[in-house]
Amino acid sequence: MIQKVKRDTLSQQVTQSLIALIDARDLAPGDTLPSEAQLALEFGASRPVIREALKALQGEGIIEVVTGKNAVIKPISSTMLRKFFERAIAMKSASFRDLIEVRQGLELQSVTLAAQRCGDADIAALEGVMAQMRDHLQDHVRFAEYDVAFHLHIASAAHNPMIYYLLESIRDAMRDNVLQGMRIRFSAEDYARVVARHEAILQALREHNVGAAQQAMQEHFTEALRALDE
């Protein structure tokens, strides 16, 4: 049965107009929108309608509304995506295998770009995290945190904010994924092998060797997927 097309409410129209205004005026994080009164005049809408539209944008994480002040543009973040992935995992809509398969695609591209673009500061940051991983081999929780940090630093070294935000949005799920792997089959030899995989990735990045970086990352994920089947 075909349903009739529903007309957007006035507040929905104003919400879209506000997004267009932000784009048209090239407003950056920290910039403020005009006051409710000014917006009401500009859009020919009542202040309650403007207020409702602002609340909608706040709910989407685009602006921050503070009572008595003009709305402020918020920095882009992975918050909304993170909530989605947390809910998907919590409700069993996605498994850890699904997560690893998503990570595999993203992180192969991430390490490819990082091998091409990383600088001295990127390598220094990765070396720092690598040292922390070695120092916390017996602490599952801390080791998992540094493992995730290592992969996020690679995403940062790719110098592609979209890749970074996508991976950062699954940070918590990645950490839980690592911890689950540790519970399944981690021995001293397993820790040593995981550290060696990360060191191989880091060495390839130092050398800007794209092929070696891709191979090391692929082997890392192949081993992670194999561990789930054991």
Image (spheres, grey):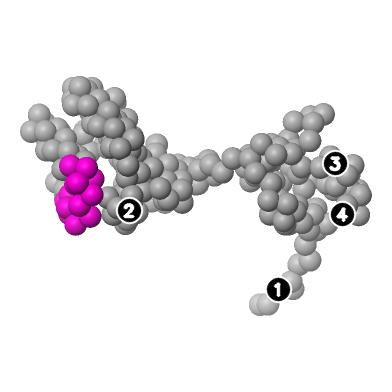
Where in the figure is residue 16, as x and y percent of width and height? Answer: 73, 57
Location of the N terminus by quadrant is bottom right
Helix, strand or loop for disc 1: loop
Q: Which residue is mark 2?
A: 113
44 part of magenta stretch: no
Give the crowd class for mark 1: few <14, some 14-19, many >=20 residues within 10 Å.
Answer: few
Residue in the foreground of this view, choosing between 181 and 22: 22
Q: Hey, which residue is sitting farthest left in the picture?
A: 189
Q: Marks 1 and 2, Cα distance to the nearest angstrom?
A: 46 Å
Location of mark 4 (residue): 43
Per the model, the C-alpha gap separating discs 3 and 2 is 44 Å
Task: Assess whether mark 3 and mark 4 are in contact (beta carbons under 8 angstroms).
Answer: no
Which circle's residue, 3 or 1, is located before the other in the chain?
1
Q: Which residue, given by chain and number where applicable, does mark 1 sit on? A: 3
**Sequence-wise, which precedes: disc 4 or disc 2?**
4
Q: Amino acid at mark 3?
A: Glu
Tag 4: amino acid = Phe
Image: 122 above or below 224: above
Please say whether residue 207 is one of the residues in the magenta stretch.
Answer: yes
Q: Is residue 136 left or right of residue 121?
A: left
Magenta-highlighted residues: 203-220
| Mark 4 in CB contact with mark 1 (< 8 angstroms) | no
Whole-angstrom CA distance, mark 3 to mark 1, is 35 Å
| Distance from the alpha carbon under mark 4 to that under mark 1 | 30 Å
- First in sequence: mark 3 vs mark 2: 3
- Coordinates of residue 195 in the picture (x, y in percent): 16, 35
Q: Point out the frontmost of discs 1 and 2.
A: 2
- Residue at mark 4 to residue at mark 3: CA–CA distance: 10 Å
Q: Which mark is residue 36?
A: 3
Pick the front one: 143 or 114: 114
